[in-house]
Amino acid sequence: MTASMQQHLQNSFKLQSFRPGQQQVIETLLAGRSALAVFPTGGGKSLCYQLPALMLEGLTLVVSPLIALMKDQVDQLNRLNIPAARLDSSVDAEALKHIYRGLDEGTIKLLYVAPERLANERFLARLKRLRISMMAVDEAHCVSEWGHNFRPDYLKLARLAGELKVGRVLALTATATPQVAGQIRDSFAIAATDHVQTGFFRPNLALTVAPVVPARRDEQLFQALSSGPDGASIVYVTLQKTAEQVAAYLKRKGLSARAYHAGLKDEARHQAQEDFMTGKVDIVVATIAFGMGIDKSDIRAIYHYNLPKSLENYMQEIGRAGRDGKPSRCVLLASLDDLTVLENFSYGDTPDPEALAGLVHWLLSQPEQFDLSVHELSGQFDVRPLVINTLLTYLELEGVVRATAPFYTEYKLGFITPQDEVLARFDASRAEFLQALFATGKKGRTWLTLKPIAAARELQVERIRVLNALNYLEQQGMVELRVAGVRQGFRMVNPPTSSQALIERLQSQFQLREQRDIERLQQVAGWAQRSGCYQQALVEYFGETLSEPCGQCSACRGQTVAMPQRQYNEVDLAVIGKVRNEQHDALATPRQLARFLCGITSPKASRARLGRHPAFAAMVDTPFSEVLAGCGESQS
């Protein structure tokens, strides 16, 4: 076994030796057991599933929320002649057919998918026909509600692994506190002895915490960049508009800088990433959307223009520096004023009590079998889609409902083979069925639009027969399919005797999540203001001990941090009264109005185009809790 592993390491991956922890994880997986790998950013997590994927029969399914990681790793594997593919929104119809053919023929060894892809009924049906030897779950901390980046889709992965008869699971993360690691192990039935952790201390990173007055932050950043090491740098900011403003400032000062954030068009984002990777641009000013899964070993410096959202985020972001082992610099420009905007984001996700109650009553009024559109409910109840998905997941965990299968309400057919020729390839009864099916659709210039539920009802057949027919035509290359209008099916399992008790429990869970987010921000502020070694405190947060101070962080170098007291604006009751008197339906409750004034968008406010209102974000520099209290007071 070890000889074969070494042979694959050298011949397939062109590497001479394993990094710490890799061999132990790989041996665990090859022995048929699931494992948890907690390695620092850049610690070589991907090899832990890529290498055994070549030694196991069947497919390795890699679940990752990071499109950049998928693209980067698949390209890298293909350059090594390792058959890997990815399925994300950028894959066109022709490439999709090629990938599906490879899966059916067993020529693809690794398939990368986003967790949302696993809510696609057509895709799941394909997976169930395959032998899946391993599921690798990247960013596995997303499975934990105690973690800093909880994603509802992740809670369903353990159940899905069972349904797909996956041979073993590898959970991977760079940022797991002991509590989060325990929840990951419980979710995927991983033994404590198969939890491999290689240590969070990075001796080549010199951490500096530098107090800053917001008015001088640009200048201080420029000075730090100018005096810093040559080579690639990332500057992390909180807001998209800040990324644009800071990048423009640095360019005016003669530095090679580019903004990167989720609000950019795909092409601009990809170009910024490509220019950074190839060295055409030295500095990327980015929100946390940048860097996840980026394999660039020679990043010499990480600068935090704003406070990070959590110590987990900070550890993950500084971990992108110095992966080549050479000395690298990590500078945090620390201002407690940043806490206001960061806290406001956390408060913004907690639903209104009225909206939550309305949503729960709607759900409990549904028949035993029902379906819904998260997008429609989001607009109806003014609750963000992510919050609705979280609520539905809570209801599943409570045993109230069970998700059955997502489905699409609309299929668009583009005929690659002319329709008459398609019909001519089938016997009389099948051709008659297809002709009747096509007749239920609405003919456009290019596409024939079908609604499977309505078609099945009109033809008096099961919906699955309609879907099977469409999928078969696609597999045979006769048509191109495009889907739209996703709805999630549910089954009512155990409705509560008291809806009010359930609503109060759910409201309490959302408030607890809000409270945890705020506590994580306070932990960042507390860590930044400490007097002892920063590295010691950081690894202690992740359950490890550094026996001696690092000797090179700013605290160890004797640079004390005396941060100015937090400054923020007072609540402007006149603005609250003025907006309330305008009687916008989307701003009817105190929390809706407070979100709007703090610059936090909501589905109803967006639909009403209130983002253009002069009062939108008028109190972005005022704590949300105070704005909310002001809105409540002015309502009474």
Image (cartoon, rainbow, N blue to C red):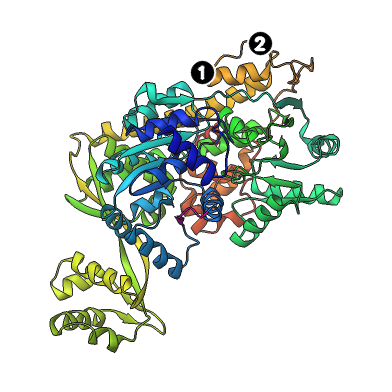
Q: Is residue 559 above or below residue 631?
A: above
Where residue 443 sits, quadrant-wise, is bottom left
Tell me the CA gap for discs 2 and 1. 16 Å
Q: Is residue 581 above or below residue 29?
A: below
Q: Nearer the viewer, residue 148 or 588?
A: 148
Q: Where does the image place residue 91, in percent across and percent down from the top left?
A: 48, 63
Indicate the quadrant containing the N terminus: top left, top right, bottom left or bottom right. top left
Q: Amino acid at mark 2?
A: Glu
Q: Which residue has dot 1 on it?
A: 543
User: What range of the chain is rendered magenta?
Assistant: 81-87
Rendered residue at 58%/22% (across/down): 523
Is tag 2's residue or tag 1's residue first in the polypeptide sequence?
1
Q: Nearer the viewer, residue 354 or 244?
A: 244
Q: Amino acid at mark 1?
A: Gly
Q: Is residue 383 visible?
A: no
Q: Which residue has dot 2 on it?
A: 548
Q: Is residue 201 above or below residue 32?
A: above
Q: Residues within 10 Å of mark 2 (few under 14, many from 20)?
A: few
Mark 2 or 1: in front is 2
